Amino acid sequence: MLVSRGNSRRIRIRKALAGFFMLLLTAAVCGCGKQEHVETEPEEAAQAEKLISVAFSEVGAESDWRVANSESMRTTFTEENGYEFYFEDAKGKQDNQITALRNYIVQGVDYIVLDPVVETGWDEVLQEAKDAGIPVIVVDRMVDVDADELYTAWVGSDFEKEGETAVEWLDSFLKEQGREDERISILHVMGTQGASAQLGRTEGLEKGVEAHDNWELVGQVQGEFTQAKAYEVVAEVLLETQDIDVIYCENDDSAFGAIQALEEAGLTYGTDGDVIIISLDATEAGLTACMEGKINMNVECNPMHGPRVEKIIQQIEAGEIPEKNYYVEETYFTAETLTEELIASRGY
Ligand code: GYE
């Protein structure tokens, strides 16, 4: 049976009150001077009642970005901040997320936060959450649903814009080098198929390739946002062809996989080498590699979504309507713009 948000609150109030009266009764029956203990109980009961339960379904732990994202949620939704936090790692599988969401619905949590592995296939379970009266906040990746009312709000990055930023940089970098008319062969290492981050970043690159007659995609391979997979697929490509000017990696972990494969093949890369490396995410490791010239440019994708999701929850608690879709402002980095202090100050 589904428990609505209001019901779950009422159940918690009842439980807290029942506990409190039991303690009063015990103190009265034994009359053994336990008033001090009894006096603290109402506070605890009230405290427990005030906690807002937030249940998060996370994609997995495939990348540094993802780890930072999970950490941001964990450190935001603490008991000290007034929350009861539930976390499920879906290990990259949508089925696991659907199961987690159904469990959260039965549990009657106050809010569900969903970072969807892929965009499609959410209508049914989101309808179930809606019927149970539980607001769903979508974070980072988007859902592609028939009716927007199926989720309360979304906050994340404009992934297509991130791809466009990379393309604009490459365009001007090649011009600076006087290579704007040269044939430029690009190897594209894609992220998880069907994830917003993959779809948008791919769209951004493909539009750039279409707009440049001399740019050619020599391959589009599945790096799945992990270093291990990217290494494997790039190494395979390098056995076929080494005629590659640019590797466009859809996240930092896959850039590290590509770099590993290039090194093994004895090819040079980065600011002092032959192959231009473009990456997205701008994690601490990614930016350090960028500062060292191993990655030519890195587009920012901010994973610190905990406080943003909390802001949405607080707006709902205050009876306000949060913005439906909120895009985070982002920039990009090259070796010239990076310093150790800047990297350290970013916190991920
Ligand atoms: O770029 C990648 C992670 O959805 C933006 O997922 C996120 C992406 C991020 O695995 O590193």
Image (cartoon, rainbow, N blue to C red):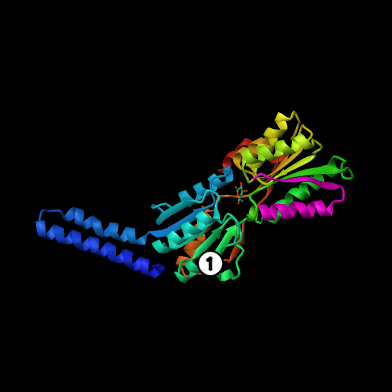
Q: Nearer the viewer, residue 135 or 96?
A: 96
Residue 73: image location, x then y, percent: 49, 51
Magenta part of the chain: 198-223
Snapshot quadrant of residue 334: top right
Compared across the picture, whether 251 is left or right of 320 comes to right
Can I make out residue 228 in this image?
yes
Residue 293: x %, y % from top left: 71, 34
Q: Does residue 152 appear to the left or right of 228 in the view shown?
A: left
Give the amino acid type for the residue marked by disc 1 in the picture: Glu
Residue 294 appears in which quarter of the rendering?
A: top right
Q: Any magenta on residue 247?
A: no
Q: Nearer the viewer, residue 73 or 8?
A: 8
Tell me: 106 left or right of 280.
left
Classify 342 as above or below 125. above
Q: Position of residue 214 (x, y in %)?
A: 87, 47
The location of residue 221, given as percent across then percent down, is: 71, 45
Residue visible at 87% across and 51% down?
213
Q: Nearer the viewer, residue 336 or 263?
A: 263
- The local crowd at label 1, few if under 14, some if 14 to 19, many if 20 or more residues have their Cα within 10 Å, is few
Residue occupying image coordinates x 10% and y 57%? 31
Look at the numbered disc 1 and say if its residue's Cβ is closer than 8 Å to ligand 1. Answer: no
Q: Residue at x 71, y 30 (%)?
A: 263
Specify the quadrant of the image occupied by residue 247.
Answer: top right
Residue matched to label 1: 124
